[in-house]
Image (tube, helix red, strand yellow):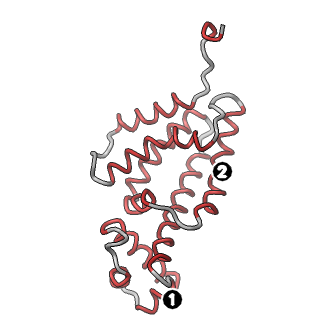
Amino acid sequence: MSATTTRERLIDSATHRFAAEGVLGTTLEDVRSDADASVGAVYHHFPDKEALVDAVRERALGDFQAAFAAELERHRDAEEGIRAMVRFLIRWCFANPDAAKLLLEGRPRRVAELNRGFFDRVQAWWQIHAYYGTVRDHDFALVHAIWLGPALELTRQTLAGAVRRPDRSTVRALADAAWAALADNPPPKEAVE
């Protein structure tokens, strides 16, 4: 098999093992065995476990960011986009539970580099709507916390087994709350006077 294929098998195996047994509970031998790779192949691609953990989280974050940005850019309407991305986040996490668990636990070393392009895309979408007055023009860290923070927290709790998986009405409530908090609704005229 090619080196790329072996590397991907190792990352796939590690993603599953780390999510199921924890990073500390998983050995490189566990990953090597699951991936049907040689010891030499493991160390050729990953000099140590930390490098493997980093590669797993980098792939998961890259996959999430690419899918999120592409989905967001499909939505021209601010309300539709805000609501859709709350639903997307929850859907992606439950479709990719191993990757989601690992991302909720930590970030890869290159997170700043990966985030730069991703947040440029998301902020560009946001700024168009802020310019036209459909959404609030807050600092983007605050926007992110309001928009996706509650959905991330519920997803984290669900993946940890602390609460049941959210049903449609719960997801709708999260999307409604995000829109209500981020829509740029001017105060009623009598409140201004």
Count the marks: how many? 2
Residue plotted at (58% across, 46% down): 72
Label 2 sits on what residue type?
Arg
Label 1 sits on what residue type?
His
**Residue 140, image x and y in percent?**
62, 42
Residue 54 drawn above or below residue 190: below
Label pair 1/2, CB-CB below 8 angstroms: no
Left or right: 114, with 49 as reference point: right
Residue 48 drawn above or below residue 163: below
Residue plotted at (63% across, 38% down): 76
Which mark is in front, 1 or 2?
1
Mark 1 and mark 2: span between their CA atoms?
35 Å
The residue singled out by tag 1 in the image is 44
For this orientation, the residue located farthest to the front is 24
The residue singled out by tag 2 in the image is 121
Q: Secondary structure at mark 2?
A: helix
**Residue 137, image x and y in percent?**
66, 34
Residue 111 drawn above or below residue 179: below
Work out which quarter of the rendered image holds the C terminus and state it.
Answer: top right
Residue plotted at (66% across, 43% down): 125
Dot 2 crowding, Cα within 10 Å, few <14, some 14–19, many 20+: some
Mark toward the start of the polypeptide (1 vs 2): 1
Left or right: 74, with 8 as reference point: right
Q: Nearer the viewer, residue 41 or 105?
A: 105
Q: Secondary structure at mark 1?
A: helix
Q: Nearer the viewer, residue 129 or 56?
A: 56
Dot 1 crowding, Cα within 10 Å, few <14, some 14–19, many 20+: few
**Residue 154, image x and y in percent?**
37, 44
**Residue 108, image x and y in percent?**
53, 66
For this orientation, the residue located farthest to the right is 131
Q: Nearer the viewer, residue 192 or 64?
A: 192
